[in-house]
Amino acid sequence: MSERGTGPYFGPYGGRFVPEALIAALDELSAAYRAAQADPAFQAELHRLLTVYAGRPTPLTEVPRFAAAGGASARIFLKREDLAHTGSHKINNVLGQALVTKRLGKSRVIAETGAGQHGVATATAAALMGLDCVIYMGEEDTRRQALNVARMRLLGAEVMPVKTGSRTLKDAINEALRDWVTNVGVTNYVFGTAAGPHPFPAMVRDFQAVIGQEAKAQVVSAVGRLPEAACACVGGGSNSIGLFSAFIDDRSVGLYGFEAGGDGVETGRHAATLVAGSPGTLHGAKSYLLQDDDGQTIESHSISAGLDYPGVGPEHSYLKDSGRASYRAVSDAAAMDAFRLLTRTEGIMPALESAHSLAGALSLTSELPTDAVIVVCLSGRGDKDVETAARWFSL
Amino acid sequence: MSQSEAANSSRAGQSSADPSKSRTPNDLAAGGLVAGGQTAADWTASDTDNGVAAAIERARLGERAALIAYLPCGFPSLAASIDACRALIRGGVDAVELGLPYSDPVMDGPVIGEAVTAALAAGFRVDDLFEAVAELAPVGVPIEVMTYYNPVFRRGVDRFAADLADVGGAGLITPDLIPEEAGEWIAAADRFGLDKIFLVAPSSPPARLALTAAAGRGFTYATSTMGVTGLRESLSELARPLVERTRVAGADNVCVGVGVSTPQQASAVAEFADGVIVGSAFVKRLAAGRDLEGFAAELVEATRR
């Protein structure tokens, strides 16, 4: 477990680059989370909710028709987070953080969302546990993801369109942080990805680690050995760190993170933070980010709102520098091809985010032995993306 | 570096660099003060003379709290922001807090947020900040740069500090940098004799107040309320107890900002704090093309005790 740090630092990355006003809350949250981890009653309640409410364990599905159609001789298995309640892996984290919120005695949760998946998951957990819920979402994204805005409002959450800066996920996080500074006494910030100030990167990873734990047991049960590769898409990096965490000590398993290449990394219109970014501080942590020479954050671009983020979690930065994980960019076009291929060959419509990891896995097979086994995290389902796909394919 | 190592190194850096640390207002009075803000006491090290602490002392001699005025560099243009700062200085402010526009200003409310967004859209570059400081520093009041950490980190912390010292800047106010994360900046500030101004908040427990007061130089920045910069109807009731707790924790100079925007509020803060920091109210006036010098003078008058 040498590399599964508990934070605040992952090598030179991580930390707490936030206003002093939040430090007391972060300390309180760290203490509450440590206590929860050590409390069998908390773990039992989380396990119960993940099982009877969220539908875990999610299945591991082999997709031979997809592999064959994609020209891969490898066996490809999908970890089906799309089948979790609310349609993505985000529920794993929010159930954990909502339980921590109740331990803190706080009655209100706030969250940021890009595509709306984390917002929907947070609104769901808030409805289940009777918490007030405010979701910050960039005004641009509220237009792109109107369906999820309606879902959140139906679940009783207040959705606040953010009109500052670039009006996307990055600015939604800024606005959520401003809310938290102001209302920290009664409010817990349910952060959606394994980024942000300590303890979020470690806590979110731990709540998402169930993905990797299940997948590892399932793939060993299916093929009798460890896979050659574990693949996932990386925006902030929560589904990927959840998958990777189970395999980090298994050196034979290659870890591959696929970032949004947008129009192509060479065009500058992308969200490939680890591939093309540089170290700096953003949203409370030191990590790779997309920035100009002055340290101003550069806006990211991706067809997938959930990957459209100029930062990334600090543990990924550490895994990149240490060489334990490899990060590559997948263009919008390649992701959309994989989206269509999986839908047509297997009857599984992936989220656009997950389509990046599918495309990445196919491109990886030429580097692996012909009988390789690849586990891909299918982090979410594609219902929310039907409109985007219809436009892309001119349906 | 671990948190405890960072904290230790910050304390170590402090003890060697700031001979004024043991000074209190009573010591000063006992030491005898002469006209022009000089004192017979032995605290006139060069780093504090150029810094904001000396300006706060001068205000104290005049039986005032210091007035520190914030404006963002490059808003509405570089030249106009420099002119605006000159107007503040003519109005009598004791120090200028010059903001470095940043793409993700999480501590700032809408007034300052919109101004820095406009400055960036107008093409502000970090090099412009040094140009502005070079023009303003000779005017005669300390110029403290308010900046989020990433532009400093990106330029190189040492290079940023060297460049700032080179143009006569007094130091940095760092709203998203706590002492535990600031080892590199603290070392650079000590090397170049710059002020390092950290924030405390109503939520800060005594141990953090002590850590922050010990790590800083110039003054400790007390945020009057839990929240972001901006105009508020009334002064937060949290301000006075925070200043008192910060003094008990060892801070010499405690200045209050965030949510202080009117002469009435400035006057109330001057009763219990060493300095009053006003930002959004100036930015709003600048954006509306209204007089800054007169308003600065009015606020300075309000800081009389």
Image: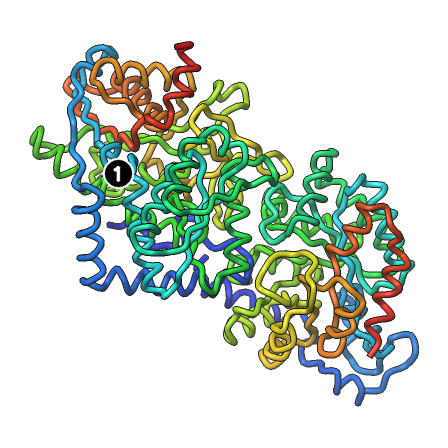
Colour setup of the view: rainbow
In the rendered image, residue B10, in percent from the top left (x then y), is placed at 56, 65
Q: Residue at x 52, y 19 (%)?
A: A266
Specify whether residue A188 is in view. yes
Between A257 and A283, the one lying in front of the other is: A283
Say if A358 sits above or below B275 in the image: above
In the rendered image, residue A246, in percent from the top left (x then y), is placed at 22, 42
Using the rendered view, name the quadrant where residue B97 is placed: bottom right
SS type, badge 1: helix
Q: Is residue B119 left or right of residue A182?
A: right
In the rendered image, residue B213, in percent from the top left (x then y), is placed at 60, 71
Between A224 and A178, the one lying in front of the other is: A178
Say if B80 sits above or below B232 in the image: above
Between B266 and A365, the one lying in front of the other is: B266
In the rendered image, residue B6, in percent from the top left (x then y), is placed at 50, 62
Specify whether residue A249 is in view. no
Residue kind at label 1, given as amino acid type = Leu
Dot 1, crowdedness within 10 Å: few (<14), some or many (≥20)?
many
Which quarter of the image is occupied by the C terminus of chain A? Answer: top left
Say if A322 sits above or below A47 in the image: above
Q: Which residue is mark 1?
A: A243
Q: Is residue B68 left or right of residue A281?
A: right
Q: Residue at x 79, y 64 (%)?
A: B50
Chain letter of disc 1? A
Between A57 and B137, the one lying in front of the other is: A57
Q: Is residue A157 left or right of residue A381?
A: right
